[in-house]
Amino acid sequence: MSSNQRQTHYTVLMLAETADSEIISTVYRKLAQRYHPDVDGSDEAARRMKEINEAYSTLRDSDERAKYDAWLASRRDRRQNDRLIKAEAEVPIGGAGTPVGPPQGSLIDFGRYSGWTLGQIKRADPDFLEWLLRAPAGRSYRDEIAQMLRHR
């Protein structure tokens, strides 16, 4: 694990803790292609690739992942006793910036539209919703997205 106390295997792979194994593998392959020593020979890429491999080796094994998740939960519990925690958990805002317009539909907690609802994404980037409908990451939102796109 990195020396950064806030960094977890999930943040290394830029994943939500609820990500399924298919998404974990897909994200790992994409990151490995980007930071592999044959592609990027820099020291930063080597450090990053080491973190990526360590995170993936834990998260791909369901038993190891369960132990890791329990360890993270105990760490959170310990921090709650140490200081005040905000009553409402915040979803970090992705690369698309602050959501525009009123919230409508499910909240996305991954990718460039992290912190946006499906309705906000529909208004700003309907093509992304069409992609999400077909992507493994959108599996849990498929019915809702299909219904939104029918009204388009």
Image: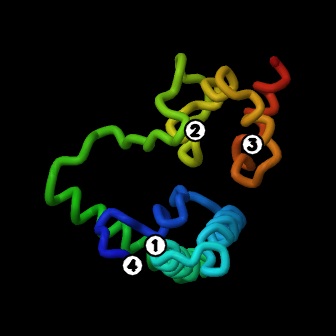
- Pair 4/1: label in front: 1
Tag 3: residue type? Leu
The dot on residue 1 is 4
Specify the farthest residue to the front: 41
- Residue behind mark 2: 113
Residue at screen point 60% across, 34% down: 106
Left/right of residue 145 with respect to residue 110 in the rendered view: right
Disc marking residue 132: 3
Q: Which residue is mark 1?
A: 44
Image location (x, y in percent) of residue 68: 44, 76
Q: Amino acid at mark 1?
A: Glu
In the structure shown, which secondary structural element does the residue marked by tag 1 occupy? Answer: helix
Instruction: Give the image quarter of residue 69.
Output: bottom left
Label 2 crowd (10 A; few <14 / some 14-19 / many >=20): many
Real-space Cα separation, disc 4 to disc 1, in angstroms:
16 Å
**Where 33 falls versus 145 (above or below)?**
below
Disc 1 from disc 2: Cα separation: 27 Å
